[in-house]
Image (cartoon, grey):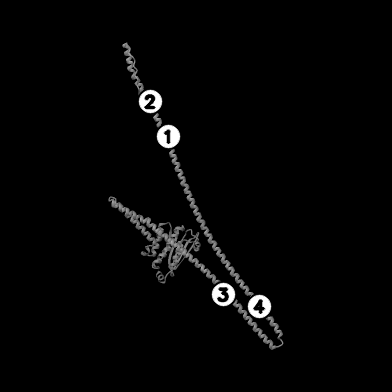
């Protein structure tokens, strides 16, 4: 606020009236003029203040904008730094994962090399054992030859003695004849003893060789039995782990799926009781959740035991599974399935169904095939299954050496439990072929024919 002060100067009166009047008029005009000047000065000061305020406002605005720009720049720099730090963390995690994968591969290669070294050591031990046996046999044969040579030398010496005795006994015919007869008897006896000794040595050598072979066979049988027990134990452990994983999966499905749906239905029911206006909508959502839960329970039950086996039989169940695979994937399936209902017991039907199901699962997961041929028929009392795909194949030797997956082992075990045999032929360019032959009981074979 600008305050104006008006000063009034007083002039002493003049005696003359004219001059007093003029002076009075001038004095009366002076306050008006000064007031006008003060007003103009006030307006000028106000204008200068407004201009100064506008300049300060513009300056403040520019400073605020600069501060805002600096803040925005700092914020972006912090975000960029944060993103870079997150990127570095992701790269470190990825590098750690790659290092873990490389370490796992290196350990797998080391185990494979250790297995190969053990196999080579076993082969070397077998060769050394065979070489030792051959050396022992050669030494025994050499000893036998030396013994025969000594016997021949003794016979030669005896013959020489006989000749000398014959020369000394030529004087008497009777004495000579008696001596010759005695010598012949002695020679015959010695020859008999020599032959009996040779036969005994040969029998001892044969018995020793038979004992060595029997010991080797017993050792091989014990090693094979140990390997079989180890393989069965590993398979049992893998089967137990698979069962536990399946139970965990079912428990997770029940907890994450059906349990959540039931909780949602519970809350929906509570909301429907509280809100009559939206009760219809809540009941509709409860019905939809209940339908989804029922379908989930059916799917879990179907995975545990196909209900179609009891309703429509084994033939229709396998045909339905192949048709479902054909409709849900781009795989071309050529199936020729003969009727096989009533050939197995219910438990055996599940086992045979699991063989076909596991074979199709392996094709879908690993084969990368375009076409699959399935043949199932009974002939001469034998049920024959053939599944061929044109996929990339694999090396069956790895499965024969015990490195195969649990799926292949379970299929072989199921086939053996059914009294049959399962074989797999595969190549890098010819795909994979699964053969399974299961002998049928006479009554079931007659019904199948």
Q: Which residue is mark 3?
A: 207
Q: Secondary structure at mark 1?
A: helix
Q: Earlier in the sequence, mark 3 or mark 1?
A: 1
Q: Residue at x 51, y 67 (%)?
A: 224
Tags 2 and 3 touching, CB below 8 Å: no
Q: Quadrant of the N terminus?
A: top left
Q: Which circle's residue, 4 or 2, is located before the other in the chain?
A: 2
> Decide: marks 4, 2 in contact (CB < 8 A)?
no
Q: Which residue is mark 1?
A: 63
Q: Is residue 285 visible?
A: no
Q: Which residue carries the number 2 mark? A: 45
Q: Is residue 415 left or right of residue 289?
A: right
Q: Residue at x 47, y 46 (%)?
A: 85
Measure how far apart labels 2 and 1 are at the Cα level.
Answer: 26 Å
- In the image, is residue 168 above or below residue 204? below
Chain-order first, disc 2 or disc 1: 2
Residue 110 screen position, x and y as percent: 53, 58
The residue pinned by badge 4 equals 152
Mark 1 surroundings within 10 Å by alpha-carbon count, few (fewer than 14), some (14 through 19), many (20 or more): few
How far apart are the two marked residues, 2 and 3, measured between alpha carbons?
139 Å
Residue 75 placed where, x, y %?
43, 41
Q: Secondary structure at mark 4?
A: helix
Residues packed near mark 3 inside 10 Å, few (<14), some (14 to 19) or many (20 plus): few
Q: Nearer the viewer, mark 4 or mark 2?
A: 2
Residue 139 seen anywhere in this rendered image of the structure: yes
Farthest residue in the top direction?
16
The residue nearer to you, when weighing 57 against 401, is 57
Nearest-to-viewer mark from 4 and 1? 1
Q: Counting residues from the N terminus, which is met first, the one under dot 3 or under dot 4?
A: 4
Looking at the picture, tell me which residue is in the foreground, 330 or 271: 271
């Amino acid at each position: 606020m600008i305050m104006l002060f008006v000063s009034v100067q007083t002039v002493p009166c003049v005696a003359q009236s004219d001059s007093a009047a003029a002076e009075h008029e001038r004095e009366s005009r002076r306050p008006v003029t000064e007031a006008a000047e003060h007003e103009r000065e006030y307006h000028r000061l106000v204008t200068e203040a407004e201009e100064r305020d506008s300049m300060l406002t513009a300056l403040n605005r520019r400073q605020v904008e600069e501060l805002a720009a600096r803040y925005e720049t700092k914020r972006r720099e912090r975000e960029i730094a944060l993103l870079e730090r997150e990127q570095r963390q992701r790269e470190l995690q990825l590098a750690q994962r790659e290092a873990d994968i490389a370490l796992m591969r290196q350990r797998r290669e080391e185990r494979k090399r250790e297995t190969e070294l053990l196999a080579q050591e076993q082969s070397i031990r077998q060769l050394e054992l065979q070489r030792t046996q051959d050396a022992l046999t050669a030494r025994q044969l050499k000893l036998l030859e030396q013994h025969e040579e000594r016997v021949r030398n003794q016979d030669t010496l005896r013959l020489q003695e006989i000749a000398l005795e014959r020369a000394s006994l030529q004087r008497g015919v009777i004495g000579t004849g008696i001596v010759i007869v005695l010598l012949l008897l002695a020679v015959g006896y010695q020859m008999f003893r020599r032959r009996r000794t040779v036969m005994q040595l040969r029998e001892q050598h044969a018995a020793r060789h038979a004992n060595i072979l029997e010991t080797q066979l017993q050792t091989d049988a014990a090693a094979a039995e140990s390997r079989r027990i180890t393989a069965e134990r590993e398979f049992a452990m893998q089967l137990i782990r698979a069962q536990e994983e399946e139970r965990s999966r079912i428990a997770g499905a029940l907890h994450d799926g059906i349990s959540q749906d039931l909780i949602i239905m519970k809350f929906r029911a509570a909301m429907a009781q509280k809100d009559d206006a939206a009760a219809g909508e809540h009941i509709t959502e409860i019905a939809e959740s209940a339908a989804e839960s029922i379908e989930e329970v059916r799917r879990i039950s179907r995975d545990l035991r196909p209900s179609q086996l009891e309703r429509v039989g084994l033939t229709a169940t396998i045909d339905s599974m192949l048709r479902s695979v054909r409709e849900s994937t781009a795989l071309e399936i050529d199936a020729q399935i003969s009727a096989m209902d009533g050939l197995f017991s219910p438990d055996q039907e599940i086992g045979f169904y699991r063989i076909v199901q596991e074979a199709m699962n392996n094709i879908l997961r690993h084969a990368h095939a375009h076409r699959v041929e399935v043949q199932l028929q009974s002939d001469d009392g034998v049920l024959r299954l053939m599944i061929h795909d044109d996929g990339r194949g694999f090396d069956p030797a790895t499965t024969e050496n015990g490195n195969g997956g649990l799926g292949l082992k379970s299929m072989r075990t199921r086939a053996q439990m059914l009294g049959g045999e399962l074989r797999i032929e595969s190549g890098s360019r010819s795909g994979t072929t699964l053969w399974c032959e299961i002998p049928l009981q006479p009554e079931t074979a007659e019904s199948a024919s």
